[in-house]
Amino acid sequence: MAEAHHEPEPKNFAPRNPPNLNPPKDDPISLTDLAQCDGTSSDHPTYVAIKGTVFDVSGNDAYGPKGAYHGEPLTKPAVIIRPLDQTNLCINIFVVFAGKDASRALAQSSLKLEDCRPEYDDLGDKEKTVLNEWFTFFSKRYNVVGKVQGP
């Protein structure tokens, strides 16, 4: 009897109520400008960058100064929920990702400030898959406002 080949079901990252997103922009955003968009000032939007693509998360109050995704740096370990868990999309990411390219931290499911950096090429396939899932997750929820300019 031949073994049946099981194909994994495709992951669905579509939100229950899909937002009306603007066409993606590729405006250059410097690291200095990105850093100012960390959710701490009403004078600037709140941005999170993944793989060099900058997402505007300002419309989500959870990233604001009083929101669930914004807060003091963690003093004890915390769990981060990966986007493939469709039963609970409440992600406790705090301020560590806002105003930065958080690619490495997202790929590693890390909330450590030192992991919040753009380098991810040296990571394994599993971590790169997680990063791509995060990119898809953000792409379906937030406007793309630009691309991170080099150092």
Image (cartoon, rainbow, N blue to C red):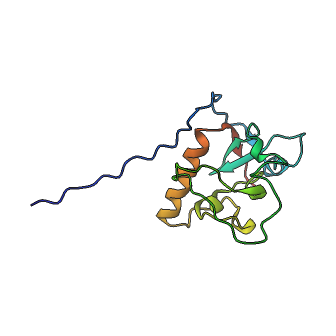
Where's residue 89, x and y in %? 60, 49
Q: Is residue 60 above or below residue 101?
A: above
**Residue that protrudes farthest toward the front in the picture:** 87
**Residue that protrudes farthest toward the bottom in the picture:** 76
Q: Quadrant of the N terminus?
A: bottom left
Where's residue 60, x and y in %? 73, 40
Q: Residue at position x 61%, y 44% from top? A: 138
Q: Residue at position x 53%, y 38% from top? A: 14
Would you identify the image quadrant in which residue 17 lies? top right
Where's residue 71, x and y in %? 81, 57
Would you identify the image quadrant in which residue 104 lies? bottom right
Q: Is 11 placed left or right of 60 in the picture?
A: left
Q: Quadrant of the C terminus?
A: bottom right
Along the line of sight, which residue is nearer the eye, 150 or 8? 8
User: Count of labels shown?
Assistant: 0
Q: Is 132 placed left or right of 5 in the picture?
A: right
